[in-house]
Image (spheres, grey):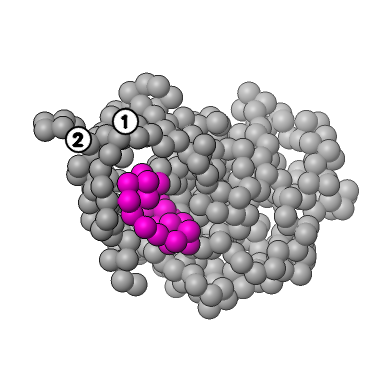
């Protein structure tokens, strides 16, 4: 792809403020392994969430001589570790947003969910930041169609967090080249435009917080370990086959196939981590106990609830809204015991990032 289409050319610096919110997302087909400048080794598919989001505000003005490039606050407080990440992010996006050299940005960011909740906070954080930055570009004279705007936001978000590229629109987004959905790219994620059966349009996501401690392996390190993984090629083929299966299931309302693929992807993710060198085990015994109890509940009650996992021990339950009361009752009676401090978070599918 000719990435020069994303380089701004008509920017006129001025003073202003942008505020936006962006949700996290939960991957159904997992992205694990990257190469080059944040390109995925396999295509991925995710539900965009709606309640678990990052709110970012940026006050921008022409940069004065000797002034720094940005000031970053998380929830109103200085966070040095985040500052470093933001600085590295700006270095990556500068070739496509050269106007940043002439601006001073006062950035304030906060989450509507706990930072260590097992929800992809980097996805919501960088997609929110990217949306603000490209919105500044647009407000300062850069002309672009709505689709080009969304593509550039996803492109920029990807350079901070690969999964962040999938939080821009909704309810489903695909990132990575494949033969099953037109217009897909390794450079940015696209909104799934084909038929979505009604049963999947109101899906719920309840996150059971099994352990909120900092992970022993960051996702970035985990992605790096995939480059020499003995099952890399098998994983690429599996992901493509599962993407085809799940897209077909979503179009015709086949929940049985949807559940099989989602749970296979969750377990494959952790199998890849455990079979990498050196091995990494992020799931806990309580994670496995919850999964077994869920399977028993699903079989007994005939309720189509399934689980998925991110790169950590916490369990995401996915199910249609009409079963919410029964699933909540099950969680409160059987699963809350396994949650740290009895904590779980309810969310549902959403439509992505927007200005406030």
Residue 213 in the image: x percent, y percent? 49, 31
Give the camera-side residue of 170 and 65: 65
The span from disc 1 to disc 2 (Cα, nearest Å) is: 11 Å
Kindly report the secondary structure that dominates the magenta region of the rendered protein. Answer: helix
Examine the rendering and report whether any part of residue 355 can be seen: yes
Q: Which residue is mark 2?
A: 63
Which residue lies at the image location 28% right of the left edge and 39% below the top edge?
14
Q: Which residue is mark 1?
A: 106
Q: Is residue 64 left or right of residue 12?
A: left
Numbered mark located on residue 282 in the image: none
Residue 356 in the image: x percent, y percent? 52, 36
Q: Is residue 231 left or right of residue 340?
A: left
Which residue lies at the image location 77% right of the left edge and 59% below the top edge?
198
| Residue contact at pointers 1 and 2, CB within 8 angstroms | no
Give the camera-side residue of 146 and 32: 146
Give the camera-side residue of 41 and 77: 77
Helix, strand or loop at mark 2? loop
Residue 257 versus residue 342 in the image, above or below:
below
Image quarter for residue 227? bottom left
Q: Is residue 122 left or right of residue 339?
A: left
Give the camera-side residue of 28 and 152: 152
Residue 141 located within the stretch drawn in magenta: yes
Residue 21 in the image: x percent, y percent? 51, 39
Helix, strand or loop at mark 1? strand
Q: Label 1 crowding class (10 Å Cα cut-off): few <14, some 14-19, many 20+?
A: some
Question: Which stretch is magenta?
Answer: 133-160
Residue 158 in the image: x percent, y percent? 39, 54
Residue lying furthest top in this view? Answer: 77
Residue 270 versus residue 185 in the image, above or below:
above
Residue 149 located within the stretch drawn in magenta: yes
Which residue lies at the image location 76% right of the left edge and 43% below the top edge?
293
Quarter of the image where the N terminus is located: bottom left
């Amino acid at each position: 792809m000719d990435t020069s289409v994303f380089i701004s050319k008509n920017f006129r610096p001025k003073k202003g403020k942008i505020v936006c919110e962006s949700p996290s997302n939960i991957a159904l087909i997992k992205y694990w392994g990257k190469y080059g400048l944040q390109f995925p080794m396999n295509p991925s598919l995710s539900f965009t969430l709606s309640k678990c989001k990052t709110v970012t505000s940026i006050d921008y003005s022409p940069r004065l001589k000797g002034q720094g490039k940005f000031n970053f606050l998380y929830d109103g407080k200085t966070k040095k570790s985040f500052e470093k990440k933001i600085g590295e992010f700006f270095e990556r996006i500068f070739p496509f947003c050269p106007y940043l050299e002439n601006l001073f940005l006062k950035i304030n960011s906060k989450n509507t969910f706990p930072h260590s909740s097992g929800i992809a906070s980097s996805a919501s954080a960088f997609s929110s930041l990217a949306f603000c930055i490209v919105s500044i570009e647009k407000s300062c004279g850069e002309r672009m169609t709505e689709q080009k705007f969304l593509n550039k936001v996803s492109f920029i978000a990807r350079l901070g967090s690969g999964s962040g590229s999938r939080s821009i629109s909704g309810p489903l987004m695909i990132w990575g080249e494949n033969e099953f959905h037109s217009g897909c790219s390794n450079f940015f994620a696209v909104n799934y435009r084909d038929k979505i059966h009604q049963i999947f349009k109101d899906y719920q996501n309840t996150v059971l917080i099994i352990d909120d401690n900092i992970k022993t392996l960051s996702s970035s390190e985990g992605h790096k370990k995939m480059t020499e993984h003995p099952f890399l090629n098998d994983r690429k083929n599996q992901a493509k086959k599962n993407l085809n299966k799940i897209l077909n299931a979503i179009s015709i309302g086949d929940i049985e196939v949807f559940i099989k693929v989602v749970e296979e992807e969750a377990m494959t993710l952790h199998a890849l981590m455990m079979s990498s060198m050196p091995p990494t085990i992020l799931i806990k015994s309580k994670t496995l106990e919850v999964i077994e109890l869920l399977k028993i509940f699903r079989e007994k009650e005939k309720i189509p609830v399934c689980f998925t996992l991110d790169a950590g021990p916490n369990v995401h339950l996915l199910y249609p809204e009409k079963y919410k009361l029964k699933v909540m009752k099950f969680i409160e009676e059987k699963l809350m015991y396994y949650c740290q401090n009895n904590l779980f978070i309810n969310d549902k599918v959403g439509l992505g990032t927007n200005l406030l």
